[in-house]
Amino acid sequence: MYGNDYGPDDAAGESGKDRLPRRDEPLNAAEAADLEGYFDGLIDADQRIEPRDAMPEAYRSTLIRMIAQHAHSEIIGMQPEGNWISRAPSLRRKAILMAKVQDEAGHGLYLYSAAETLGVTREELLDRLHTGRQKYSSIFNYPTLTWADVGAIGWLVDGAAIMNQVPLCRCSYGPYARAMIRVCKEESFHQRQGFEILWVLARGTAEQKAMAQDAANRWWWPSLMMFGPPDSGEDASKGHTAQSMAWGIKRFSNDDLRQKFVDMTVPQAERIGITLPDPDLRWNEERGHYDFGEVDWAEFKRVLSGDGPMNAQRMAHRVRAHEEGAWVREAAVAYAERRAAAAAEAGAA
Ligand code: FAQ
């Protein structure tokens, strides 16, 4: 079930009397006085909050931050791979990579649209990105030095993105959850194409093999950072996790998802024939999970504060593309206005 619009009338009781109120119906006096209770009721019943529902301001702003950061990541994430479209080693690889980069643009569009349902404009969100008031994922501040990096991004970065985003398909905010369903299907294709690129390289010449290994060496740790700061310890996030889990936005903590990702990826690396760059990585029979080494959280903080290898270039490129695209936005608005005027004239005639 996608939203409280579509639930059965007796979702919370056979008579329908004590089911959750919906905003498209007049509220009775008790319900109107208890807007917070209404919201909590929806969350407790694991239903979806929809754009027209009353919601706490902190819930709205948390979602705007998170969905916008996600949208920004998708469009900035086009840069490291777009950089390789003209240099992909065959027509087949070029066609696949172009489709993938277009998918990322599409994800950005779904996500900006989802954020807009919370009462913020796309213009404002892009302005927050361009002025550094909102972030994008740390991972896109690393360079793509060789063709194998395109494989490593698909395999590790999309792999981490899926691990993080599949639970978001059950996020309590309906528009975000629904966007995530399609995004995850596409990310899963992306992950496989990355795996396949590395698989082929790992079965190529010694030089190609080394290239695959080198890419995995450089992308492994930054991929683990994608899940965000640890749940505890001195590097722990001051954090949104506890509140976001209580609101049904996040379903798992950052460390839980990181562990799931490690557990999923180690056997895949073995299959490809790549050694992950962590001497502490080993199966722990007792825990039923892989143990792994300490992430360099100082590096994560540096990258977040703007001092990663590619931060400046990514932002400069993004702002330049936005400015150079101004005429397209203006033309689209002028065209829409002309069509609306023509439709109004035809209606009046
Ligand atoms: N990078 O308390 P938490 C992709 C910030 S899409 C930058 O744990 P939260 C597709 C966080 O915002 C990748 N900042 O926060 C693709 C917060 O900032 P604040 C993007 C990070 O929100 C593939 C502070 O640290 N995915 O890859 C990062 O509960 C290939 C404290 O952190 C999403 O955005 C980071 N890695 O959990 C495209 C998924 N981690 O408030 C192209 C949706 C944390 O202090 C090619 N987002 N921060 O300013 C999420 O799931 C969550 O927002 C987390 C962070 C898990 C990222």
Image (cartoon, rainbow, N blue to C red):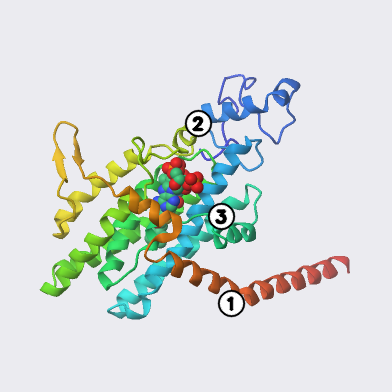
> In screen coordinates, is 177 left or right of 61?
left
Mark 2 — residue? 46
Mark 3: is the Cβ under 8 angstroms from ligand 1? Answer: no
- What's the CA distance linking mark 2 and mark 1? 44 Å
The numbered mark at residue 231 is none
Looking at the image, residue 85 lies above or below residue 234 = below
Would you say the residues marked 3 and 1 are in contact, meaning their CB atoms lie under 8 Å apart?
A: no
The numbered mark at residue 324 is 1
Mark 3 — residue? 133
Examine the image and state in which quarter residue 237 appears. Answer: top left
Looking at the image, residue 156 lies above or below residue 263 = below
Examine the image and state in which quarter residue 24 appears. Answer: top right
Q: Residue at x 65, y 56 (%)?
A: 121
Rate crowding at label 2 as few (under 14), some (14 to 19) or many (20 or more) other CA atoms within 10 Å.
some
Rendering coords of residue 79 (x, y %): 42, 69
Q: Regarding mark 2 in the picture, which secondary structure is present there?
A: loop
